[in-house]
Image (tube, coloured by chain):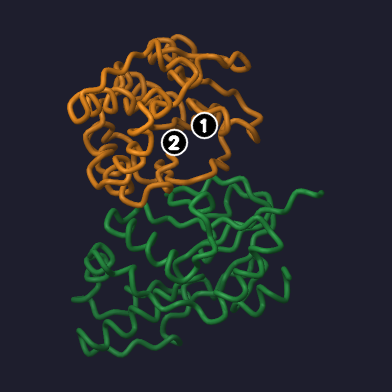
Chain colours: A orange, B green
Amino acid sequence: MNKKQRIAIDMDEVMADTIEKFIQLYKREHNFNASLEDMRGKEFRDILPAELYNTTRKYVNEPGFFRDLPVMPDSQRVVKELHEKYDVFIVSAAMEFRNSLIDTYDWLAEHFPFIAWQHIIFCGLKIVKVDIFIDDRTRNFVDFDGRALLYSSPHNLLINDYERVDNWLQVADKLL
Amino acid sequence: MNKKQRIAIDMDEVMADTIEKFIQLYKREHNFNASLEDMRGKEFRDILPAELYNTTRKYVNEPGFFRDLPVMPDSQRVVKELHEKYDVFIVSAAMEFRNSLIDTYDWLAEHFPFIAWQHIIFCGLKIVKVDIFIDDRTRNFVDFDGRALLYSSPHNLLINDYERVDNWLQVADKLL
């Protein structure tokens, strides 16, 4: 039997829609209407009024922030199918936010219960040995010599150096 | 400048003395005297009376269990010196126990504050790209083609297939 290829899949802005949560949160709490068009090539905080710039950090450090993130459309079905064909690892930079660890763990258990604990990795630098890497941050591809798929997110839309996927249906087309 | 070699260092039974915690805990709670001699080649639970066999799992799932583990002698000084010479990553299989995540994070922050979050990895399977790997579990070396150092722990004392270190002074002798 051939060994399955390994895929690393990032969570935030790939499986979990952090941007959508921010949009709703800033509308509700600060009456600020974020537009995806304004976000092209920028981080979410970069489109905020100056007085709100430092508030995103406060929110992501609050317990609960990562617990109710919307699930990215089609990700559950496609990740499940990938999981059957490949050796799938979820690789999140959760270590940046202490209070995100349990929330991220519970979010995964709720929405992707077929991913066993052996296949979940919380880290900072993503020094993982895999064949395929799906991530929205190009910094995670720097030392990576496998197939990198850049998952589209507003902040990376001006980058042209990587094979790109805009949504999970495109991931399915490429890998299933 | 040459790129530093990367070292992965396991936590339980390597940096943190889980066995010593179990010995004290079973003495206090169950009046059971564990001897290191009886443990040779065995897991801690294997030396317990039959009626206590399943209790270790209960303890390790309790919040707080991993928060006050004793620090392995000399590990703080030696890991700090390794950190100056190498690119050090702490790689723990913390994902097995949901409630260990925050405790393990806080334990590291308290006893090894010089390790930045970027260099901490909580996982199950240890699929990390490193040059040197210090661990007490040979299963973590199976797919590893770098230099593996088996850190002595009672359960692995009958294994002769790996380069072995009995304590942190021996790690220092080999790597510093």
- Residue A33 lies left or right of residue B13; in this view the side is left
Q: Give the structural element (helix, strand or loop) at label 2.
A: strand
Which residue ends up furthest to the front in the rendered image? A51
Looking at the rendered structure, the kind of residue marked 1 is Arg
Above or below: residue A142 compared with residue B11: above
Q: Which mark is residue B61?
A: none
Q: Chain of mark 1?
A: A
- Residue B148 lies left or right of residue B65; in this view the side is right
Which residue corresponds to the image point at 67% horizontal and 49% vertical from the top-left? Answer: B145
Q: Which mark is residue A6?
A: 1
Task: Pinpoint residue B90: horizontal percent, then vertical percent.
Answer: 52, 58
Task: Pinpoint residue A68: horizontal percent, then vertical percent.
Answer: 21, 34
Q: Chain of mark 2?
A: A
Image quadrant where one finds the C terminus of chain B: bottom right
Quarter of the image for residue B104 reads: bottom left
- Residue B167 lies left or right of residue B48; in this view the side is right
Q: Mark 1 or 2 closer to N-term?
A: 1
Q: Which residue is mark 2?
A: A89
Which residue corresponds to the image point at 38% horizontal and 47% vertical from the top-left? Answer: A97
Check chain identity for marks 1 and 2: say if they share one: yes
Which residue corresponds to the image point at 25% horizontal and 80% vertical from the top-left? Answer: B49
Which residue corresponds to the image point at 66% horizontal and 57% vertical from the top-left? Answer: B132
Looking at the rendered structure, the kind of residue marked 2 is Phe
Within 10 Å of disc 1 (Cα), the crowding (few <14, some 14-19, many 20+) is: some
- Is the Cβ of the residue at disc 1 closer than 8 Å to that at disc 2? yes
Q: Does residue A155 appear in the picture of this structure?
A: yes
Task: Pinpoint residue B153: horizontal percent, then vertical percent.
Answer: 50, 74
Task: Pinpoint residue B113: horizontal percent, then vertical percent.
Answer: 49, 65
